[in-house]
Amino acid sequence: METSLLEERRARLVSYRRAYNKAHQKEITKSKIKKRRIRKIEVKNFLGAKCVCCGFADALEFLTVDHVNNDGAEDRRKSCGNNDVAYNEIWRLMKAGLPVTRFALLCWNCNASKHAGNGVCFHKRNK
Ligand SMILES: [Zn+2]
Ligand SMILES: [Zn+2]
């Protein structure tokens, strides 16, 4: 096949895709959000589905990924405030079968308390 023909085809494919994306933007965004939600659930299940501090395990939405070494500020800065960088990193390790050492699950209470207590949750203080 001639190069020009190939290029023509490629250009047509690109413009087709662009038009498709434009027409289906809403659904694409929705499915992206859905994928992200599922990914978060899988990551939380992978990390044990309970708070490593107090053992809370009643509901996944009360659990959040915590940076074990309190080095989350940089990650959050990179992702404009949310924890997606952490989730993506854990997802990558999970798929590669590698150990997750930088992250652990904490419930929001322990997470908030840990931040208030300079990296130590109330449960671990005063002991
Ligand atoms: Zn907790
Ligand atoms: Zn705690």
Image (spheres, rainbow, N blue to C red):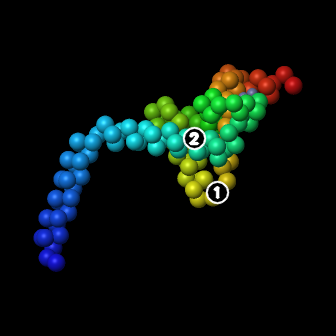
User: Percent from the top left, x then y, of residue 2?
Assistant: 14, 76
Image quarter in which the N terminus is found: bottom left
Q: Please identify the quadrant where the C terminus is shown.
A: top right
Instruction: Say if residue 83 shows up in the picture.
Output: yes
Residue carrying label 1: 98
Q: CA distance from mark 1 to mark 2?
A: 19 Å
Q: Amino acid at mark 2?
A: Ile
Q: Secondary structure at mark 2?
A: helix
Beta carbon at label 2 within 8 Å of ligand 1: no
Q: Look at the picture and state if 63 lies above or below 85.
A: above
Residue 124 badge: none
x, y percentage for residue 54? 77, 30
Q: Which mark is residue 41?
A: 2
Taking the image in four quarters, ligand 2 sits in the one at top right
Q: Residue at x 14, y 64 (%)?
A: 8
The crowding category of the residue bearing disc 2, from other C-alpha atoms within 10 Å (few below 14, some 14 to 19, many at least 20), is: some
Rendered residue at 16%/59% (across/down): 12
Q: Is residue 4 above or below residue 28?
A: below
SS assignment at label 1: loop
